[in-house]
């Protein structure tokens, strides 16, 4: 929090430092996979190299963040929050599903290399290696000093928010939830006696009352509340009426300041509702999809770093900048001006019905505009 009373955040969507990315880091895990067509994680490395050139493996822990590290240093956000869509485990016992993501615990410094403060865990991959894999993930993050929300050793732990203490006072409090529309199996829901994720029963009044009660129980003056929600499918810009209503009511009824949505492999619309930020889908930020064909029209290789500035007292949005990157050779590289313009035009088109436009700045970043935005 700076002397002007604002709080800066770094928000990103799905961070999947698994499979091929795990294999290029200093401590690669067992590369065996149980997918229909790929049985070795190193095949994803080969696909990326065929698309964009050789990857100098093993790489350092900072490698995958690439140019994003300089952008983070320049922005100096007060809290850095991502959705970690992978288990951190040595487990060799996959859950019975088509794709299973894991990062070797020895590679967890890949998150510390970017100074990540908090990981949302309520998603459809954190239990890819069963309850044992989840428990190992929780222990590894705790040992690394990285806060986590959205999954736990029981229902109470999964519902508990992560708290990031800010220098100079105030806190960023992160609640993490998943919805079945993102592919989370119902049996992954945490119970009083079983580890699991914070799974929303619905997007209705009962879920809102529960969230509102949890916010009331923890929020103090000067706190910023982030609701990190994993919802919706992988491709497509549509925001359902139920999702929009739920996001609005999180702000109106549950005193949430930022709705941080994710699950889609590409960025989705932005809205500012009653002065509060809604990111319906931040898209992937780091993955190993490079070289995989299909859905090219969405340009999933173009990703965005979201940098909102909020009024510390009210949580209202003061400014929102997006820094575009392109994933190549499993590394985040600053997008060219043409690529940034494409992302800005696409997000602007999809966000226009929500009252938000995006301007391309001289430094190739994007600045959001909305009715009533501070000058």
Image (cartoon, helix red, strand yellow):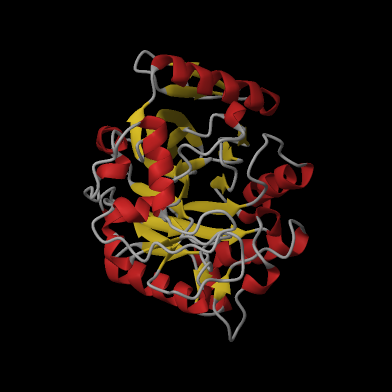
Q: Quadrant of residue 88?
A: bottom left
Q: Residue at x 49, y 59 (%)?
A: 39
| Residue 223 seen in the current view | yes
Q: Residue at x 26, y 58 (%)?
A: 109
Q: Position of residue 37 (x, y in %)?
A: 57, 54
Q: Position of residue 277 (x, y in %)?
A: 55, 38
* Residue 199 vertical placement versus 130 (above, below): above
Q: Position of residue 169 (x, y in %)?
A: 31, 53
Along the line of sight, the residue nearer the viewer: 125 or 352: 125
In the picture, the quarter occupied by the N terminus is top left
Q: Residue at x 36, y 37 (%)?
A: 49
Question: Is residue 78 rendered to the left or right of residue 253?
Answer: left
Question: Is residue 41 rendered to the left or right of residue 144?
Answer: right
Along the line of sight, the residue nearer the viewer: 47 or 174: 47
Q: Quadrant of residue 185?
A: bottom right
Q: Residue at x 39, y 57 (%)?
A: 118
Question: Is residue 264 rendered to the left or right of residue 239?
Answer: left
* Residue 163 vertical placement versus 5 (above, below): below
Question: Is residue 197 rendered to the left or right of residue 173?
Answer: right
Q: Position of residue 155 (x, y in %)?
A: 58, 77
Residue extending farthest to the bottom is 193
* Residue 272 vertical placement versus 222 (above, below): above
* Residue 164 vertical placement versus 280 (above, below): below
| Residue 17 seen in the current view | no
Q: How many circles with numbers are drawn on the protein?
A: 0
């Amino acid at each position: 929090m700076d002397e002007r009373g604002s709080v800066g955040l770094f928000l990103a969507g799905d961070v999947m430092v698994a499979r091929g990315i795990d294999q290029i880091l200093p401590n690669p895990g067992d590369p065996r996979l149980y997918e229909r067509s790929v049985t070795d994680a190193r095949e994803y490395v080969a696909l990326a190299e065929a698309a964009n050139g050789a990857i100098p493996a093993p790489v350092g822990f900072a490698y995958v963040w690439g140019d994003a590290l300089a952008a983070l240093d320049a922005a100096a956000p007060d809290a850095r929050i991502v959705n970690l869509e992978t288990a951190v485990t040595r487990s060799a016992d996959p859950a019975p599903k088509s794709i299973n993501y894991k990062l070797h615990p020895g590679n967890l410094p890949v998150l510390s290399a970017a100074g990540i403060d908090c990981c949302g865990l309520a998603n459809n991959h954190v239990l890819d290696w069963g309850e044992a894999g989840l428990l190992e993930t929780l222990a590894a993050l705790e040992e690394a000093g990285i806060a986590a929300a959205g999954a736990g050793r029981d229902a109470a732990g999964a519902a508990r928010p992560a708290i990031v203490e800010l220098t100079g006072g105030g806190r960023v409090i992160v609640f993490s939830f998943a919805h079945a529309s993102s592919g989370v199996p119902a049996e992954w829901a945490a119970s009083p006696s079983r580890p699991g994720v914070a799974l929303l029963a619905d997007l209705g009044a009962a879920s809102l009352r529960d969230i509102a009660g949890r916010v009331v129980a923890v929020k103090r003056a000067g706190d910023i509340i982030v609701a990190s929600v994993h919802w919706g499918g992988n491709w497509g810009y549509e925001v359902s009426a139920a999702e929009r209503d739920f996001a609005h009511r999180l702000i109106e009824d549950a005193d949430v300041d930022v709705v941080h949505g994710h699950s889609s492999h590409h960025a989705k619309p932005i809205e500012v509702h009653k002065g509060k930020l809604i990111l319906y889908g931040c898209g992937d930020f780091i993955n190993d999809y490079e070289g995989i064909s299909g859905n090219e029209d969405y340009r999933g290789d173009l990703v965005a770093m979201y940098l909102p500035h909020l009024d510390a007292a009210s949580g209202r949005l003061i400014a929102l900048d997006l820094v575009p990157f392109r994933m190549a050779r499993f590394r985040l590289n600053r997008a060219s001006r043409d690529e940034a313009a494409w992302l800005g035009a696409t997000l602007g088109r999809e966000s226009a019905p929500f009252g938000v436009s995006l301007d391309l700045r001289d430094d190739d970043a994007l600045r959001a505009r909305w009715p009533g935005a501070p000058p």
